[in-house]
Image (cartoon, grey):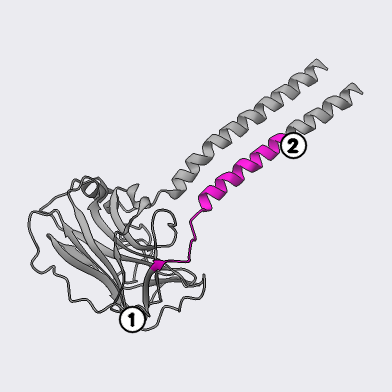
Amino acid sequence: MRKSLRKISAAIAGCALAMALTVSAVPNAADAATKPQSTKAGIKAGKAKFDPDGTYHAYLGFQQTTTWIFRDAWFNPTTGRDGSDIKDLDYNGLLKSGDNGVEQLEGTTVTDAEITGNGTYTIGVTGLNGALPDVDGTNNVISLIYASTDIPLSAVEDGTVKVTDVKLSIDGKEAFSGDPYINEDTKLLKLYQFDCVNTYQNEGYENPSILTPKDSITITFTISGFNNDNPDAVEATPAAADTSSASTSSSGTTSTSSTDSGSSAGTVAVVVVIAVVVVAGVVVYVKKKKN
């Protein structure tokens, strides 16, 4: 009987240790899954010190759910500027995830900005020609429109670099102006990215509600913090806002990215259930031995 009890005690202790290790490991796994991946150039840019006499870049980022027409951040190791999946595809146009993998969305032209001094810059995409399906309830929602830069985040956080007068235009009509959302994920890479539309973020940011673009998307912004002004970086005369096709009201979409947190909770729950079953089995076993 004593030997049996020792075996039972050892089994319970082992189960408890396994559960503790699993629970402690889950948050680490979740952290690794949520940390954005980057090319070596992206990591290097995030670690660099801002150069007020240097040249930097702003790249248009885009994502439409359901159709999965997109353009990823420049530092994305698979579908970014130097991504492994780009190969013969053109990063200077929108891409699409299809049955045959990543494909080119023909006819689109993306314009990025080379920042060589203080001034107003515009990035965007033209030639959509109705390629994006219309918004249909929660389907085909444009989830992301953003500017991905190679500017070290530290220069923005300490006030050296300032980005102001951010405006998003759809088909030449202003759809948003104000303070953009500073992307939390790219903070881990220490790179500055600002989002005009991010439906994955529903706390602390009011997403503009926009209709699906028919031809073009542009983001215009003013930047300062350099030692010189760029005389060519001036804002074009904007078109008059059309309230029938664009609105700055809060978006009805509140989808969030919760895969990692749900996975963590599910793993912990499974471990707890296993532990309870083991303990219950031990109790039954002891009762049977007494009888």
Query: Which range is magenta?
Result: 249-277
The residue tagged 2 is 277
Question: What's under tag 1, amino acid-wise?
Answer: Asp
Which of discs 1 and 2 lies nearer the camera? The answer is 1
Residue 123 screen position, x and y as percent:
25, 69
Q: Please give the name of the residue rendered at 40% of the width and 76% of the height, measured from the top-left corner.
A: 211
Residue 125 screen position, x and y as percent:
30, 74
Question: What's under tag 2, amino acid-wise?
Answer: Val
Looking at the picture, does residue 157 appear above or below residue 200? above
Secondary structure that dominates the magenta span: helix
- Secondary structure of the residue carrying tag 2 is helix
- The disc at residue 215 is 1
Q: Is residue 121 left or right of residue 68?
A: left
Other residues around mark 2 within 10 Å, as few (<14) / some (14–19) / many (≥20): few
Image quadrant containing the N terminus: top right
- For this orientation, the residue located farthest to the bottom is 129
Q: Is residue 237 left or right of residue 262?
A: left
